[in-house]
């Protein structure tokens, strides 16, 4: 449960940071958007170090599924575009894959 909360917070931070760059470069917003964007991206990286995994690669790989699902939530909540059934199916597949990576029993 702790990992899920950390991953959700990391996804929010990464999406916020990336959107700040998107807003600056694609939406013509002020370069000042980069200040909170960089802070959010640093916080995202920090959060991933808090995942209970022996190897960074596994923590990052499992996070990928959470990021995909969170991006679709952003699409709907912030951009007003409702994900279609294929978006949802893809996210579910990714979340199952993330769970396998993170929760699989492994020899110590």
Image: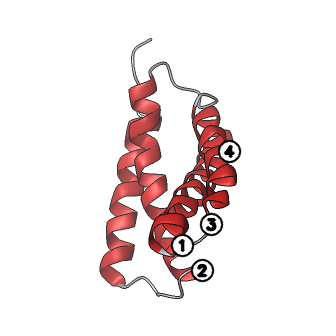
Mark 1 vs mark 4, CA separation in Å? 22 Å
Q: Disc number at residue 77?
A: 2
**Rendering coords of residue 53 (x, y %):** 52, 25
**Rendering coords of residue 76 (x, y %):** 53, 81
Categorize mark 3 by other alpha carbons within 10 Å: few (<14), some (14-19), many (20+).
Answer: few
**Rendering coords of residue 67 (x, y %):** 47, 55
Outermost residue toward the top? 108
- Of pointers 2 and 4, the one earlier in the residue sequence: 4
Secondary element type, mark 4: helix
Look at the numbered discs 2 and 1 and tell me whether their residues touch, using CB distance below 8 Å. Answer: yes
Question: In the image, what residue occupies the spot 44% across and 36% down?
Answer: 60
| 22 vs 4: above or below | below
**Rendering coords of residue 41 (x, y %):** 59, 45
Image quadrant where one finds the C terminus: top left
State which quadrant residue 100 falls in. top left
Q: Name the residue under label 3.
A: 30
Categorize mark 4 by other alpha carbons within 10 Å: few (<14), some (14-19), many (20+).
Answer: some
Question: In the image, what residue occupies the spot 66% across and 40% down?
Answer: 43
Closer to the eye: label 2 or 3: 3
- Of pointers 3 and 4, the one earlier in the residue sequence: 3
Mark 2 vs mark 4, CA separation in Å? 22 Å
Q: Name the residue under label 4.
A: 39
- Of pointers 1 and 3, the one earlier in the residue sequence: 3
């Amino acid at each position: 449960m702790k990992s899920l909360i950390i991953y959700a917070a990391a996804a929010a931070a990464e999406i916020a940071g990336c959107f700040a760059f998107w807003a600056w470069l694609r939406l013509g917003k002020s370069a000042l958007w980069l200040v909170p964007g960089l802070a959010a991206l640093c916080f995202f990286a920090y959060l991933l170090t808090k995942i209970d995994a022996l190897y960074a690669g596994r923590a990052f790989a499992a996070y990928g599924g959470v990021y995909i699902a969170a991006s679709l939530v952003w699409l709907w909540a912030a951009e007003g575009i409702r994900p279609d059934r294929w978006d949802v199916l893809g996210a579910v597949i990714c979340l199952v894959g993330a769970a396998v990576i993170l929760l699989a029993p492994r020899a110590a």
